[in-house]
Image (cartoon, rainbow, N blue to C red):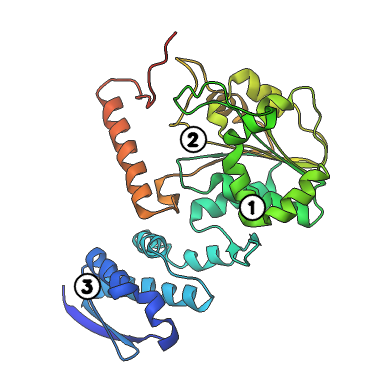
Amino acid sequence: MSIIETIIDIPAEHERNVCGQFDQYIKKIERTLHVTMVARDGALKIIGPDEMIRKARSVFGNLVELSMRGNTITQQNVDYALALSFSEKDHQILEIDKDIICRTVNGKPVKPKTLGQKQYVDSIREKMIVFGIGPAGTGKTYLAMAMAIQAFKDGEVGRIILTRPAIEAGEKLGFLPGDLQSKIDPYLRPLYDALYQIMGAESYLHNSEKGLIEVAPLAYMRGRTLDNAYIILDEAQNTTPAQMKMFLTRIGFGSKVVVTGDQTQKDLPGTSASGLDTAIKVLKKVEDIGFCYLTSSDVVRHPLVQKIVQAYDDYEAQHESKGGSRPRYQKNRKQ
């Protein structure tokens, strides 16, 4: 295999962004593709095998294009561009970047960052009910919230309803002080955080006072019919089959529903069945219901989160291959 070299130009104003601090992104590409890269005076020299040079040019060119579109290049962008280069889908990273869902209160665009997230967002647009299933950090809730807020702003729905089961994550917290709202707010804090970031606290409070945005525990959904609403059920793996059926049968005309959950992080007591697992089996053939499965490759938090998720996936697969059941990561509960 012959070693060749090539030189590509780097726009001066984007050099720091695409090369990273102390050239950390260039070093990452070098280690992954086994090439040598030297950035100097607005040019990048790449030395290595012909096939690897082609991949390096494509990855770096995509990063430059993302930077020129106003993106701040992160480790996740570099890792994902490299991953796509091995599957011959590297050009798709630019297509994903075009899909801007909305902007945060600070003007930052909210958009999918992986192919899995793009398929998730497209499914939400096309289907009446969508299940977003995947590990922590894949943007299941955040993207659903962004879609809901944009639909509300565009007048496609009259209100937003956000709900999740009020269940402790493996701990007994005892009685919490305050009124009923104060007791349930800690369970709903992740939903508030996303609302404040995308919509802004002032806008949320204004619409909340008018009853147009509601954040409530799942138990409050019983007996209601939810018309012309965007409804998000978060942490669905902690619902019982009865709760899931109750929730899904609340849907009225003009509504859209997104159900998010992580099948590996259940906090239900003992061997209780998960409503999410049951719904996947029962509804998989029902028309106009979509199921999107995100994986560790769709994690967009700190790169270490992706490694943690993958490590747990590998451990569970190894455990099951030896004839054991899937391990549960929670403390034993006293009966």
Question: Residue at 38% across / 24% down in the picture?
Answer: 328
Question: Residue at 58% across / 44% down in the picture?
Answer: 141
Q: Which element is circle 2 on?
A: loop
N-terminal label among 1 and 3: 3
Q: Residue furthest front?
A: 177
Mark number, residue 35: 3
Please give the residue where the numbered disc 2 appears in the rendered image: 262
Q: Which element is circle 1 on?
A: helix
Is 22 on the left or on the right of 130, as rendered?
A: left
Residue 197 visible in this rendered orientation of the protein = yes
Residue 72 percent across, percent down from the top left: 47, 70
N-terminal label among 2 and 1: 1
> Does residue 283 lie above or below 257 as drawn?
above
Q: Amino acid at mark 2?
A: Asp
* Mark 2 and mark 1: Cα distance apart in space: 23 Å
Say how many tags the image has. Answer: 3
Is 305 on the left or on the right of 210, as rendered?
A: left
> Does residue 215 lie above or below 43 as drawn?
above
Q: Residues within 10 Å of mark 2 (few under 14, many from 20)?
A: many
Q: Residue furthest bottom?
A: 41
* Mark 1 and mark 3: Cα distance apart in space: 44 Å
